[in-house]
Image: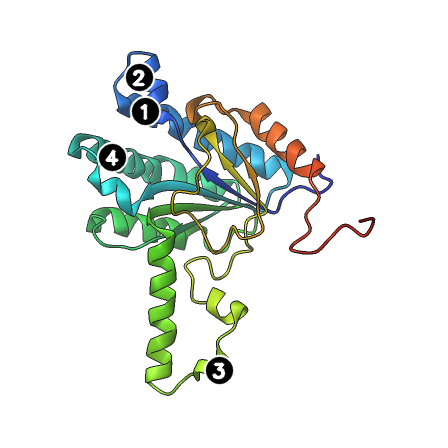
Amino acid sequence: MNMNVPKHIAIIMDGNGRWAKEKKLPRIAGHREGIERVRETVKSAAELGVKVVTFFAFSTENWARPKKEIDGLLKFLDYFLEREVKELDKNNVRLKFIGREKPIPENLLKKMRQGEEKTKDNTGLVMVLALNYGSRQEIVDAAKKFASLVKSGKKEVEDLDVDLFGSYLYTQALPDPDLLIRTSGEMRLSNYLLWQLSYAELYFPKKYWPDFKRSDLEEAIKEFQKRERRFGGINVEE
């Protein structure tokens, strides 16, 4: 399994609500079970040799969901930060958040910053939570940062290239994902890491996220290992 393991796996945790509905449970029960899968996936990924896992936890569009569900999701995140940061630190995992801060509640932002600070020197797996995240918004924010530097005379328009632009994204210090996993069988990117996923392999298992176990992660990695990544080139035998 350690041969050709993806360095960075991006995950869209889809199907929590449908999982709960099929079991005649409230939608929030699906999110609760989904958090267990996050915990399990982080542990498994680290053991399998993955360096970075980025979870799509909450999109900028998710604020349109029912208030009760949003409040429940934020409560679970608060619980996660209260209970799991110490365990992440113990296991040498570095925690990082990407996304816009507003309108995340200030008390939650404070705990997010504390979690990043507490684990910043860890050298193991990097666990990234994309929270209040939207890729188009990220690209716009990056463009504004560069434009501001040009306006102030610190940069020239001609300075801009792919690598420099990438340095203004939320993921600036991270490698681009090698593999995207979206559970539940849906085959969309949903405004997630559009720039960073340019050359990623895509994998769409039909299982809902609450049912996605270590064996499923291993299967995704095995599928990744079968594929030939060309990055726009061709097979030398063609």
Residue drawn at x 44%, y 26% is: 184
Query: Which label lies toward us, 4 or 2?
Result: 2
Label pair 1/3, CB-CB below 8 angstroms: no
* Number of residues whose C-alpha sits closer than 10 Å to that of mark 1, classed few (under 14), some (14–19) or many (20 or more): many
Residue drawn at x 23%, y 54% is: 102
Residue at the spot of label 4: 75
Q: Image quarter for residue 129?
A: top left
The location of residue 125, given as percent across then percent down, is 55, 45
Residue at the spot of label 3: 158
Mark found first going from the N terminus, 4 or 2:
2
Q: Image quarter for residue 79?
A: top left
Label pair 2/1, CB-CB below 8 angstroms: yes
Query: Which label lies toward us, 4 or 3?
Result: 3
Mark found first going from the N terminus, 1 or 4:
1
- The quadrant the N terminus occupies is top right
Residue at the spot of label 2: 21
Element under disc 2: helix
Q: Nearer the viewer, residue 185 or 211?
A: 185
Residue 17: give its label: 1
Query: What is the three-letter code of the residue carrying label 3?
Result: Glu
CA distance separating discs 2 and 1: 6 Å
CA distance separating discs 4 and 2: 21 Å
Whether residue 114 is situated above or below residue 139 in the rendered picture: above
Mark found first going from the N terminus, 3 or 2:
2
Query: What is the three-letter code of the residue carrying label 2?
Result: Lys
* Number of residues whose C-alpha sits closer than 10 Å to that of mark 3, classed few (under 14), some (14–19) or many (20 or more): few
Give the left or right position of residue 39, taking residue 141 as reference: right
